[in-house]
Amino acid sequence: MDYKEIGFMCGIEIHQQLAGKKLFCDCDAINSTKKPNLKITRRLRAVAGETGKVDIAASHEMKKDKEFIYVSNSEDTCLVEFDEEPPHSMNKDALATVIEVCQLLNAKIVDNIQVMRKTVVDGSNVSGFQRTALVGIDGYVDTSQGRVRIPNICIEEEAAQKYDESKDSITYKLDRLGITLIEIATEPDIISPEHAKETAEKIGMILRSTGKVKRGLGTIRQDVNVSIKGGVRVEIKGFQDLKSIPKVIVNEIKRHQKLISQNKKIQMEVRKAESNFSTTFLRPMPGAARMYPETDIAPIKPEIKKLVKREMIFDKIKRFSKNYKLSSDLSKAIAKSEKADLFETIIKKNSKLKPAYVAEILVSYSRELLRDYMPCDPLLIKENNLLDIFNELDSGNITKEIVMKILVDISKGKKLNFDNYKVKLPDNFEKDVEKIVKNNKGAPFGAVMGEVMKKYRGQVDGKILSELVKKFL
């Protein structure tokens, strides 16, 4: 597809949750697993914004006439989330992180931060609005396809999470409401679907490089705005992952092309990215009518500090590949993971271990446990457990083959005792290896090792067996 020829225009919006405390109260920024013990019900109506008009998207939601039920656990929320108490002062640490991100994205910091209310009456905000504030303007990020401009960077509240839904009501859980979000919006400088993915990934890695963002499913979201010649802008929400971005955009372009060929009007609207890479209608496109000033929070004079020099994740990927001889994919996986620092600590403390082996274990063990060893909880495996395991391995007290068993046992709640896993060399195993070599006379080294490992895997370190096979060959 010739994207220039079809008049392809595309920009993205990225919403990233921050760790720590919430934006306007002292509750922790967590996704609670506690059972709700509080409940209120509300009905919401849209109000006119600064323009004197009611926003079209808000009117659309209000017509659904839904009752909203809000639940939470009293240990994880306070009166601010229930809109029964005014917001506290803005979280200074969160604002400092957003200012740092503005600097990393080459943006100018505004002179005064004015918190605004954005009308939202789909129930995801108890108050009927979301608090948002512009922090940075006129930034940019450089990509392989050229510079992508970033006109604005905002700090705002996260919405509540949908918990249940019926014909007449929607239930929301409030532990997510009020978590700090960074919103980053680009100009339509993206020239192709793959470029959209690259831009989202580059900005995402800059955000992760601060060390201040939340990690895990749902903590970062991308919205894509797209249009082609003869059509209008459509916003797509709900991407499952970065890989789905190009596929959804291509299918959305084809939908636009089909409508244009049939002389049908493309509606300016918000659509949802589905799992089959198509899109479905969510609501009309909101506009400026939904915004009005927040009267409970005074304007804030930003405190701009000298940017702390940090190693960006994309630079770390290159360094890992060069210094530790990791493959491109493995360098990327470990550098982007939460265990990047742990990886380097292990390598520095254990000189006999191969970096590629350590990196592979660190990036894959949680996935492997959940796939093959349920019921288990990978979160039970702490950093000190991993440090001890690799130290024992480097010392020759345990074998590589037993490492996964140790991780399985810890994830199932068993107390770690290395005496249960230490290498106990079988009696006369050297003579047995010699016999296997003689019985496979003329066979290549790999075939002989295969026979030896069948018998002694997990009992004797592979390196010891390899040296013995070479000796008797």
Image: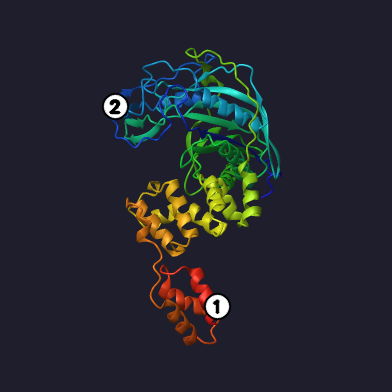
Numbered disc 2: secondary structure: strand
Q: Which residue appears at 55% of the width and 24% of the height?
A: 95
Task: List x then y, in percent, for residue 157.
Answer: 48, 26
| Circles 2 and 1 in contact, beta carbons < 8 Å | no
What amino acid is at disc 1? Lys
Q: Please give the residue where the numbered disc 1 appears in the rendered image.
A: 470
Q: Nearer the viewer, residue 167 or 183?
A: 183
Numbered disc 1: secondary structure: helix
Marks 2 and 1 sit apart, C-alpha to C-alpha, by: 69 Å
Residue 109 in view in this figure: yes
Residue 38: give its label. 2
Position of residue 96 in the picture relative to residue 164 (left or right)? right
| The image quarter in which residue 148 lies | top right
Colouring: rainbow
Q: Which residue appears at 51% of the width and 38% of the height?
A: 220
Q: Nearer the viewer, residue 439 or 471?
A: 471
